[in-house]
Image: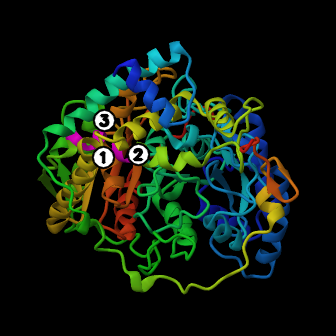
Amino acid sequence: MDVSQLKIRQLREMLDKKQISAAELADEYIKRIKKYDEKLESYITVTEEIAKEQAKTAQERINAGSASALTGIPIAVKDNICTEGVKTTCASRMLENFVPPYNATVMEKLNSENIVMLGKTSMDEFAMGGSTQTSAFAKTKNPYDLNRVPGGSSGGSAACVSAGLAPAALGSDTGGSIRQPAAFCGVTGLKPTYGRVSRYGLVAFASSLDQIGPIARDAHDCALVLNAIAGCDSRDGTSSRVAVEDFTAKIGMPVKGMKIAVPKEFYAEGIDSVVRDSVLSAAQKYKDMGAEIVECSMPSLKYAVAAYYLISSAEASSNLSRYDGIKYGHRSSKGDSYGELVCNSRSEGFGEEVKRRILLGNYALSSGYYDAYYGKAMALKQKIRAEYEEIFKICDVILTPTAPSVAYGINENITDPVKMYQADICTVTVNIASLPAISTTCGYDAKGMPIGMSIIGKHFDEATIIQVADAFEKNFEAVPPKMV
Amino acid sequence: MDLDMISYLAKLSKLNFTEEELKKAAADMTSIIDIMDTIKEVDVVYNPLADNKNMYLKDLREDIAKDSMETEKILQNAKHSDNCFVVPKVVE
C-alpha cells in the first residue's frame, strides 16, 4: 500500500473502517523511512519500537470505538521537543546524549490522543538557521532535489512529510522555522499565535518568539494537529487563556467578501520574480473567488531582520547560558577549575552558528550598546506590531511570499551569515508581532521546485487563515516530489 | 569589530576561540553589525508599558507546593555522586 501522499483524514477513515491496523500503518512508514531516509536524512532518531508499542495501544482504543482525530496516526517530532526517554539532541553535540526525564506538554497532549511517534527529526542546531545544514547529525536534503536544502530550522519535519515518511510532524517557529521549510518542501506549515501552544518542554531559543506548530500535507490536517496541541498550560506562564476553538470550524466557508491585504514591501526588490509572480497569481485566484485584494504598506519591514536578530540573539545568549556541562549536556574532559570546565564544555558542544548568535546577543546586551541595539530593536518590535494592527483594521488576512526564493543549493548561503539572515525577511515580522501564519504551496518554478505563500491572521484567528489556505489548496494541484 | 572587542564578547559568552577563529568571528560580526546598524536610522523609542498590557497578574496560579521531579531523574544526564552534581574543586 502506498501511504506516501495520504492525509490524516484519509488515514483516520482507513483506521476506523479497519482497512488497515495502526500497527500496519506504522510499519508502512517505518519501511519508507528505511528505504528513503538514508539519502534524505530527515530523522535523527527513528523510534521504531516505541511506534510499535504505541500502535498496539492505539488499536485497542480504535477497537473500543473511542478513537479521537489522531489516534493511531503516525507523527514525527522535531528534535528540540522533549520526549521522555527518547534522545532530544537539538541537532547539537551539546545535547548529543541528552535523554529528557519528562515530556513536553505537546507530547503529553499527543500521547493522550494515542498518536504513534515515528521519530525525532533533524533541524538547524538549536533551531538557529534556515537550511538544516547546521545540524550536527543529519544535514537533511530537499525531497524535490537532493542537491538543495529543505529549509529550516524544521527542515527534517518538512522534508519527512513532503517525502511521505510521515503524514504530519511537529516543528517550531522562532523566525520562520515552520513556514519556510514547509514552503521549500511543498507542504503546509502553521505557526500559531504566540501563547496558543505551550512551550513547556520546547528547548528554548528565543522565548518571546518561539512557538510549536504542525507541518502536514494540507491546512485541514494542520488544523487537526493544532486542535490536539493548543491550550493554556500552567507550566508555561506565556501560554494563553484565550479559549481553544475547533480550528477546522471555518473550513469550506467561502472567502467571498473577505479582504486580503498585500503589503507592497513584501513584493519589492530582493524577492525573486518567479516567487512574486506566483504569489500575486494566487492573489488573483482569491479575487476570482470573490475576495477583495487590498494594497497596503509595512514601512518598517526593511528593519525587521535587524530587529529580529538582535532580539532573538539576545534571548538566545541568555537562554543558552544554562549549558555549563554540569547539570546536563556535553561535559568536557578538560578543565581543572569550574570556569575552565564551563568554557571548554560550551566551546566543544556548540557549533559555529550557535556561537555566532551568542556573541551577537551578548554584544546587543553589553554595556554601552544595549540602548542602541536591544532597546531600539524592542522599539521596532512595537512599531511593527502597530503597523500590523493598522492593516488588520481594514483587512481580514495578509498574503505574502514565505521566502524570497525557492530552495537553494546545499552550501549556498551557509558560509555567508549576512545572506542567510536576510533570507528571513518574509517571515520574521510574524514572530515579532506574535501573529499566526500558515504557509502553503502556490506554485512551482521551471525546475519544479515548490513556491510557498503565507497567509497571516489576527491574533488567535488561526481558524480564518486555515480557511483561506484550504480554499486555495482545494483548487490547486500539488505535485509530489519525484523521489516518492 | 576589532580583536579586543571580539575577545571581550568571547569572555562574556564563556567560549574559547583560537586566534584564527577570533579573526573569522570578528570579520563575520563586522558584516552582521553592518545590517544591525540600519535600525539606528529609525526614530523610535521603546515604551515598556505597552508590552505589559496583556499581562494579568490576577491570572497567576495559586502558590501551592507540589511534588517535584525525583532526584534520580534530575541527575540522569549529569556526572553525579551521592545525589549531587559533580563539579571541579572550587575552594582550595
Quick check: do tags 2 and 1 share a chain? yes
Q: Amino acid at mark 2?
A: Ala
Provide the residue designation for mark 1.
A374
* Residue placed furthest toward the right: B82
| Identity of the residue drawn at 76% across and 65% down | A19
Residue A314 is tagged as 2
Percent across and percent down for residue A194 are 41, 63
Mark 2, secondary structure of its residue: helix
Mark 3, secondary structure of its residue: helix
In whole angstroms, how far apart are the C-alphas of marks 2 and 1?
8 Å
* Span shown in magenta: A302-311
Nearer to the camera, B22 or A381: B22
| Identity of the residue drawn at 75% across and 45% down | B87
Does label 2 or label 3 sit earlier along the sequence?
3
From where the camera sits, is residue A447 visible? no
Percent across and percent down for residue A399 are 27, 52
Q: Amino acid at mark 3?
A: Val
Crowd around label 1: few <14 · some 14–19 · many ≥20 (10 Å): many
Chain letter for mark 1, please: A
